[in-house]
Amino acid sequence: MAINPVLRSASLLAVMLLTACASLPGDAPVWPYPDPPRSDPDWGYEPQSTPPPERAPYSPPSRHETQAVEPAAAHHPSILALVEQAEGERAAGDLERATSTLERAIRIVNNDPLPWLKLAEVRFEQGNMIQAENLARRSLSFAAQGPTARAAWLLIADIKRLQGDQRAASEAQDKADGR
Amino acid sequence: MQKLRSFLFKLSVVLLCGALLLLAGYTLMLDQQIRSRFTGARWALPAQIYAAPLEVYPGMAMTRFQFLEELKRLGYLRSPRAELGQGQYYQQRDRLELQTRPFVFPDGAQPSARVRLEFSGQQLERISQLDHAAPLALLRLDPLLIGSIFPQHGEDRVLIKLAEVPALLPQGLIQLEDQRFRAHFGLDPRAILRAMVVNLRAGRVVQGGSTLTQQLVKNFFLNNQRLFSRKFSEAILSLLLELHYSKDEILEAYLNEVYLGQDGQRAIHGFGLGSEFYFHKPLAELRPAELATLVGMVKGPSYYSPRRHPERSRERRNLVLQEWHEAGLLDAAALAQAQGEPMPSASGRRVARRYPAFAEQVRRELARDYPEQALTEEGLRIFTSLAPQVQAAAEQAVQQGLDTVEAGRNIAGLEAAAVVASVSDGSIVALVGGRDPNAQGFNRALDARRPLGSTIKPVIYLGALLRPQNYQLTSLIADEPIALDMPNGSRWEPQNYDGTTHGKVPLYQALARSYNLATVNLGLELGLSRVIETLHQLGVAEAVPELPSLLLGAWDRSPLQVTELYAALASGGYAQRLTSIRAVQTREGELLKRYPLELAEPLPAGPVALLNWALQQATQQGTGRGIYRDLDPALRVAGKTGTSDDLRDSWFAGFGANYLGVVWVGHDDNRSTQLTGAVGALPIWSRMMRGAGLQGLAQPAHVPLEWARIDLQSHLPAPRGCRSVLRIPFVAGTVPKQNAPCATTSGWDRFKDLWR
């Protein structure tokens, strides 16, 4: 079986970040924020990237859908293709194009949390914490549990930590841990 | 004598020199003008507006007919054989093969693709590439060009490059209009002589000796003819053009400049726009018959218009084709085929659609970022969110709905407006400004500000639900008479629509059945300032009048503004400014600006989810029930009717998972319509949303809700027992402690109670 592309790009990013960290002087901030909270040990960490979504057999979205489903279990192939493309663009440093691609995915299927989460991650990477949090919360409105929801809570926890709001951060962390 | 002669000689030399100087000066002036016209802003190019591209994927709910409809809109041609060209498709029952057009999207260039689509019933089943038989997860078609922003009485054009036009066009044009174009120096003395002879023989002007260069000059200065009408300056200008520019440059300018007819206020310039306007497809895809029609029009754009005079235009076309054949540009088979083709308008093709109401919204949004001149001259490419198929559904619903209601109730002159927005990104996908969607005038969706009546009620109930410790969906409200003394000395005594009162009613029923008295009592209990605060939380930026009549919707809003208000509810609490623009490119296809998706800080998810549940009850048991005459009863839809005082305005606002829509019906002069929201606006809304492909609401996933069985008599929880119960959501931890009298308890519960 081929390596999951999302997993592949996630690990690629992690490796890139590790090398970047290694080559930086110890106290240089990694993220472009004006006032780094230096007391925060988590400063400069890459937000936990999304775990690979499970590829459950896809069933076409019904126009009569009335029940809350957990779409994280079944992403539409077209969404996966666009998310994969966006991950490539993101890895190449073209965040604007990745944004474009993810917005395209959001418009195609309106109830999949994955592109929302990915867009939140891109905004985070750009240093736009407000949008990142709002987008992560929007992604949560489509998936209660599952890997995407967990990643969204982890991202929110990271944002809250950066903002110095430890209480909100640990609340989000608890949600991510299913507590 | 000698002296006089020498004086006359000197005088004539001086005069001649003076004349020459004047001529030189005049020539220099013309030179200046022609060069600045040709090179400077070579063409004032209006901004081009594109609709959202259609994206299709396997599993999508789309029939073959819907897809073919879209191809027709884009001007794709059905090919009789399986050999495809760009912009053509081949159909075999449920299987469709097509070759898309290449297009430069804001996120990059997309090459032409050859694909096969397989449909089965209501669904697009499979997409694959024709050449490698590889499956495709997603296919994006080229977007529909829906209009352009040109100044009043302006020129409009689609810029083309000589290298990109079908070879037959320049060849055929030269053959017909100016055979010695490649050889002459701007003027063609032989052609002028020949024309003179012909005209003398006929005794009138039947033939002109103008070269293409002279025609271009004429077209350049079409608007200030008085200044340049003299043949003399035209000749000088032509010589100057030939001096400065190559034949190809002049030819390309000609192809872009030539006047090809009028569309209302809009002048059609150039073959690029001519092709879009008369044939609804890019120039590169025109066939010989179509090219001949356009080239034939050069001689007299309105006289030979295929729209106005199809028969005359056909004769002219066939003459042109014949001449091309004799010149060796067409072989006999091509000639026979081309001459047999029907004319565009005669075959019943629809006239070019230009979506003036939506384009107006685009123009207003652009005006925030770009000066007027940039929009009408720089040829920007504007990418918008318009979904042509939803727009078509909305226009049709408005027209049919008004016709039906007028016929049934013997009224006339009703008007309507409609807006459909996408729930996910708050973009406008359809906008109808009035009954006649092609009218340029009053855009009711943007500019008709009318009292919104009961459509405001969800705001008041949300204001209450945002205090979950004080208000739940089952909280009882008094639907009882109330009278208020107003500051101006008058007395305000609101009434229910049916004139009755209902006593204590639970909150969700008061909303679902749109009880006025209960709403006013609730609003006053909450306080007007809290209601207004809720409006601001939903994204209303401007000041709101702090009057009790606000509670019943005595507040003027445009349909677009009402849509914006509901967008915050539909998205689960994210206030959004509705937009129509996604990106702007330069005329060369470089990205200039993106308008990214931005979310405001959300309202608490729980209360919004409760409100949306109550709005679903409004369509299940309340005033919005009528929507299921058109919609699938299995769809869960949230919706609210609205009616203003004296039945002047009829509203319906509602949403599913993908789309949010608002419809207004009323009279332009504000007369009473005699229609409630449920009678006037609702049927239009439901037909519009059915056509748009509305998806039902799902329960919001990550909202900490607690569901409880509620007894419909006492409106209290009944964990067991009771005859008629309804499962109602609560914000977690706010289910009332007291159980319904009819509730029975299990043995285990009684056992637990012993130890309390």
Image (tube, helix red, strand yellow):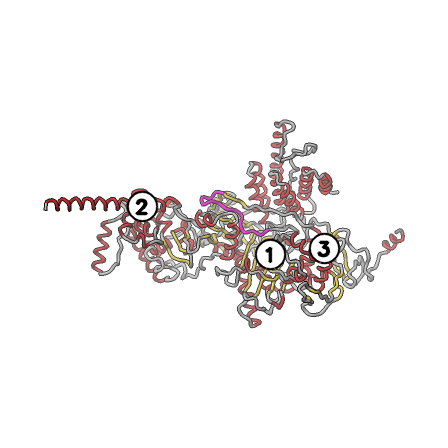
Q: Secondary structure at mark 3?
A: helix
Q: Earlier in the sequence, mark 1 or mark 3?
A: 3
* Callout 1: chain: B
Amino acid identity at mark 2: Met
User: Of B335 and B712, which appears nearest the observer?
Assistant: B712
Is residue A118 rendered to the left or right of residue B372? right
Quadrant for the N terminus of chain A in the image: top right
Q: Position of residue B26 (x, y in %)?
A: 28, 46
Three-letter residue code for mark 1 = Thr
Q: Residue B443 at what x, y percent from top left?
A: 52, 59
- Binning the other alpha carbons within 10 Å of mark 3 as few (below 14), some (14 to 19) or many (20 upward) gives many
Decide: few, some or many residues near mark 2? Use Cα within 10 Å; few <14, some 14-19, many ≥20. Answer: few
Q: Is residue B580 magenta?
A: yes
Considering every residue shown, the one lying at the far right of the view is B754
Residue A110 horizontal/vertical position (percent):
61, 50
CA neighbours of label 1 inside 10 A, class few (<14), some (14 to 19), many (20+): many
Q: Quadrant of residue A46?
A: top right
What label does residue B563 carry, if any? 1
Numbered disc in front, either 2 or 1: 2
In percent of the image, x 35 and y 56: which residue is there? B297
Q: Which residue is mark 3?
A: B465
**Pick the front one: B596 or B334:** B596
Residue B83 versus residue B548: which sits nearer the camera? B548
Span colored in magenta: B577-591
Residue of label 2:
B29
**Gap between marks 2 and 3 measured at Cα:** 75 Å
Instruction: Tell me the quadrant of the picture where the C terminus of chain A can be found.
Output: top right
